[in-house]
Image (tube, rainbow, N blue to C red):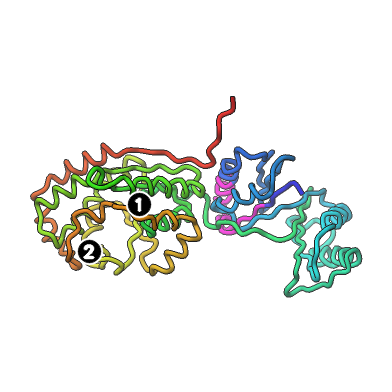
Amino acid sequence: MTSVVVHYQEIALKGRNRPWFIARLVRHIRRATRDLDVEAVRALMGRIEVVLGPRQSWEEVRERLAHVFGIANFSKAGRTAADFDRVAAAVLQDLQGHEAQSFRITARRADKRFPLTSPEIERRLGALVQREFGWRVDLEQPELVVQVEMLTDEAFYFFGKERGAGGLPSGVSGRVACLLSGGIDSPVAAWRMMRRGCHVVLVHFHSVPFLSRTSQDKVREIAALLARYQLHVRLYQVAFGAIQRQIVLATPPPPRVVLYRRMMLRIADAVARRAGARALVTGEVVGQVASQTLENLSVIGAVTNLPVLRPLIGMDKDEITLEAQRLGTYPVSIIPDEDCCQLFTPRHPATKARAADVERLEADLPVAAMVEQAAAEAELEDFRYPVVQSRV
C-alpha cells in the first residue's frame, strides 16, 4: 500500500470556487511533505492522492498530514485499476496478517458508470473476505472496516481512517494579525483562526530590558509549534516597556491597564497594515480578567478601524486549556515568565472604563509618535515548517 487517500469535507461545499480551494490544499500538502519521500500529490475525483516513495515510513507522513488544515480524514491505501477482480485480489492479499473477529465492507462509486453498484461491491467482496478469513460480518460495530472507492480508471482500498485537522486550507480566508502573549489563551486563538483558513501573523509585546527575555523565548517556541499547522509564521516582537513607563508617569493607576491595551491595539493595527492583515485577533474572554469586561473591551477596541476578532470570547479556562493541550502549546505557555502584563500593573485596575475619561488622559501623551516608533522598531522573525536542510 503505497498511496494515501486524503478526504476533505467543508471544501466540497464551495461550489464553483471548489477547484481553487482544492489547489490550495494540494499545495499545502506538498509543502508539508516536501522533505519526505513523496513522489506526487494529485487531485482526483472528490479526493487527493499522496503517492509515497519506497523509502517513506507511514508514521512520519501520518504525523505531517494530521496538521494540515483542510483535511477531514486520510488513510494509507492501495491503488489498483478500476476492476472488481483486481481490487478483490489486492484486498485479500493486503489483509493477510490482520486479526479481526468481525468486519464490514463499505464501497463508494465516484463514477456511476462502473457496472457494479456499491451494495453489489460490498456483498461480493464481503463474501470473498468471509470465505478467506472466516470473520463475522458486523454492519453496526465491526472490528475492521474495509473501504473501497471506485473512480473512473482506478480504485483505492484502505482499512480505517486517520482524523485530519479539519477546517480550511491556510490563507484562503485572508491575513490577520494576532496579539500573542506567552500565556495559554492567545496561541489557541491564533490556531483557531488558522483553522478557519486565515494566515496569521503574530505580534508579541515584551518589556525587555525592564523584565527578562523569558516571554520572548516562550513566544518563539509557540510560533515554531504553530508553524507546524501554518507552515510559515511571521512573528513581530514589539518593545513595550518604555511605553508603559510613559503611561505610568502621566496617568493615575486604575485606568492604566486599559491604556496599555489601547496602545497595544494601536501598535498591532500599524503592524497589521504593514503586513497586509485585514483584521486583529486577541485571546480575550469576557470577564476573565479586569481588562476584559464588556465596558473595557468596548473602550479598548475603539482605537482601531480593523475588525477585532475574539475567537475565545465565550469559552471558559478549562475549555481553552484542553485545546492548548491538544495543539501542543500548553507545556510552553505554563512556563513561568515575566511579561509586559505584569509590569507596572495597578493593584486595583478599572473594570468599567469610560471612553471620555481615557481619551482625556491620552491627550497628555504623544500617542501617534509612540505608536509609529514602536511599530517601526518591531523585530521580525520567520518560522518555517518543515525545516529543510540544505544538501551539499
Residue 203 image position (x, y, % from top left): 34, 47
Height in image: 54 above or below 65?
Answer: above
Q: Which of marks 1 and 2 is nearer the N terminus?
A: 1
Other-residue count near label 2 (Cα within 10 Å), few / some / many at <14 / 14–19 / ≥20: many
Height in image: 126 above or below 39?
Answer: below
For disc 2, the marked residue is 296
Q: In which quarter of the image is residue 24?
A: top right
Check residue 360 for magenta coloring: no
Height in image: 317 above or below 73?
Answer: below
Q: In which quarter of the image is residue 271?
A: top left
Residue 238 image position (x, y, % from top left): 28, 43
- Secondary structure, mark 1, is loop
Cα distance in 3D space between marks 1 and 2? 19 Å
Of residue 233 and residue 101, the one placed in the foreground of this image is: 101
Left or right: 286 in relation to 46: left
Magenta stretch, main secondary structure class: helix
Residue 360 image position (x, y, % from top left): 9, 56
- Secondary structure, mark 2, is helix
Left or right: 301 in relation to 92: left
Q: What stretch is highlighted in magenta?
A: 6-25
Residue 310 image position (x, y, % from top left): 36, 60
Residue shown at 13%/56% (left/top)? 359
For disc 1, the marked residue is 180
Check residue 7 for magenta coloring: yes
Q: In which quarter of the image is residue 52?
A: top right
Count the marks.
Answer: 2
Q: What residue type is labelled 1?
A: Leu
Of tags 1 and 2, the one toward the viewer is 1
Height in image: 103 above or below 258?
Answer: below
* Residue contact at pointers 1 and 2, CB within 8 angstroms: no
